[in-house]
Image (cartoon, coloured by chain):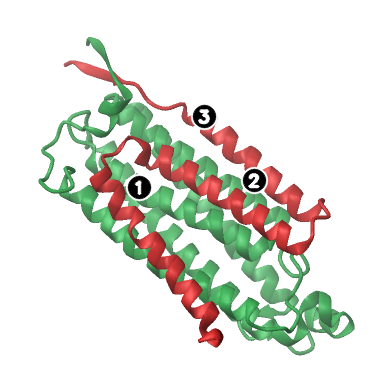
Chain colours: A green, B red
Amino acid sequence: MTHAHASTADLMRPPFPAEPGAGVYSNKLGMWVFLASDVMFFTALIGTYIILRFSTDLPWAQPGAVLNVPLTAFNTFLLICSSVSMVKAYAAIADGDRERLKFWVLMTILGGATFVGIQVYEYVKLVGHGFTPNGYREGSELATLAAAEPLKYGLQTAGIYGSTFFTMTGFHGFHVTCGVVCMTWVYFKALRGGYSQQDYRGVEVIGLYWHFVDLVWIILFTIVYLI
Amino acid sequence: METTARKHPNYVAIWVYLAVLTAIEVGVAFISHFPKPVLMLILVGLAIWKALLVALYFMHLKFERWRLRTVFIVPLPLAVILVLAAITEKLW
């Protein structure tokens, strides 16, 4: 086995046939077009939240009053870690190392699955405390707190807050779940000897999707949990 | 079989960069005493910075041809127009 070195520019010139036009193979172009449409999808969700929140003079729940920010900050860090492991998987197969590909894809699957697990845990806790898509459940702990401190907990806007929060984070969680399922498929294909330095399209395409999901979460975390 | 080692960006450095920016974000949001509008500008700025790092280095947009970058860049102004148009609806 001999090794040669190529430049960083060669990184994006995989040795499979490129399509005319955008100059990339069709799977990758298709994923980019899908991601462009997904930008608009998440813009609709996040934009709706921004409009509903800032077009009212009524107080909104303060950051950290309802949501568990430290736990979600850890989850954000976890998703960033899984993005790194995904790109390491890509780098491994681009260098022709299928063993490292399998290891890093498995790490990414574990990271993504843990992220979803923590999100489900967060949902269970929130609903248990009384935060639902309809606002604060009558008679719940949060409803009592909100009645005592309506400004801090945004009592009058709780319904909009609940519905936008669960819609945005729920759709993002669905995206992460889809990514984990796709990466599991990639992992089993790699186990069966799939992918090589000559053809690693599947790894690159699912990697693009995974990084986009991470990118969306970076924006969501700031807008929903910190502002 | 010949394998060619490609020169990859320093992904671990980007990971550290992102982790530090996330810590700064949480610190700014909960420890600092900036006025709300300033705080929002700083937090959104940090989020865009992080998102750019992911897009440029993990999604390799920095190394792609402009023809492909355009596919991702085109919807961004449309997204801004969509939100601004809805926010300013009451003005027109």
Q: Secondary structure at mark 3?
A: helix
Q: Is residue A68 visible?
A: no
Which label belongs to residue B4? none
Percent position of residue B44, x then y: 61, 56
- What whole-number distance in Å separates the C-alpha atoms at marks 3 and 2? 15 Å
Q: Amino acid at mark 3?
A: Val
Q: Is residue A137 left or right of residue B46?
A: right
Q: Chain of mark 2?
A: B
Q: Is residue A137 left or right of residue A145?
A: left
Q: Quadrant of residue A136?
A: bottom right
Q: Amino acid at mark 2?
A: Thr
Q: Are the residues flagged by discs 3 and 1 in contact, CB closer than 8 Å? A: no
Residue with the mark numbered 3 = B12
Q: Chain of mark 3?
A: B
Q: Secondary structure at mark 1?
A: helix
Q: Quadrant of residue B2?
A: top left
Badge 2 local density, few (<14 within 10 Å), some, or many (20+)? many
Q: Secondary structure at mark 2?
A: helix
Residue with the mark numbered 2 = B22
Percent position of residue A35, x then y: 34, 58
Which label belongs to residue A208? 1
User: For the point 72% across and 53% down, which residue is it?
Assistant: A70
In the rendered view, tell whether residue B3 sits above or below residue A193: above
Percent position of residue A219, x then y: 55, 57
Specify the quadrant that holds the N terminus of chain A: top left
Q: Are the residues flagged by discs 3 and 2 in contact, CB closer than 8 Å? A: no
Q: Chain of mark 1?
A: A
